[in-house]
Image: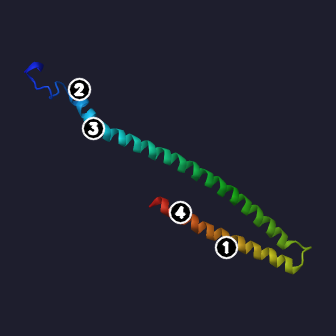
Amino acid sequence: MTNSSMKPSEPATTGALIAKGLIDNLPVIVDGLKEVYALRTKEQAFKAALQSRCTELQINSQNFSTLVQGLTELSKAEGADEETKTMYREMIRGLFDLFAMRSRDSSAFSDFMNS
């Protein structure tokens, strides 16, 4: 069978068959590429936001440690009266309660991300 005896709508070679498939499915392929690009862009934005949040949490963690150490030293200072020492201890407890609450929130976020 020669090319001249084939119908014009029939591909003559494997390459032509592939080209025809690509052309017929071009809108679907283009839409798929657009979706992948959009997801990639969203992923990059989310990754940047998450990295920023992690950096912020690291700074907050360092500030928390510094603050607790300072309050602990103040609560043990010999020159402070008992009322002031008690106030410092209550502040430390409040910080730990806040830290525990934020940890639970962070854990809930991690669980959400892993599901």
Judge whether 55 appears above or below 100 on screen. Answer: above
Circles 3, 4 touching at the beta carbon (< 8 Å): no
Q: Which residue is mark 4?
A: 109
| Along the viewing direction, whichever of 18 and 100 lies nearer the viewer | 18
- The type of residue carrying mark 2 is Gly
Q: Which residue is mark 3?
A: 25
Query: Which image quarter holds the C terminus?
Result: bottom left
- The type of residue carrying mark 1 is Asp
Q: Is residue 52 left or right of residue 72?
A: left
Badge 1 local density, few (<14 within 10 Å), some, or many (20+)?
A: few
Point out the tag, 3 or 4, that comes first from the N-terminus: 3
Point out the tag, 4 or 2, that comes first from the N-terminus: 2
The part of the image, by quadrant, that contains residue 95 is: bottom right
- The type of residue carrying mark 4 is Phe
Q: CA distance from mark 3 to mark 1?
A: 58 Å
Q: Which residue is mark 2?
A: 15
Circles 3, 1 touching at the beta carbon (< 8 Å): no
Q: CA distance from mark 3 to mark 2?
A: 15 Å
Task: Name the residue: 36% across, 42% down.
Answer: 31
Badge 2 local density, few (<14 within 10 Å), some, or many (20+)?
A: few
Q: CA distance from mark 2 to mark 1?
A: 68 Å
Q: Which residue is mark 1?
A: 97
Residue 81 at x, y = what percent? Answer: 89, 78
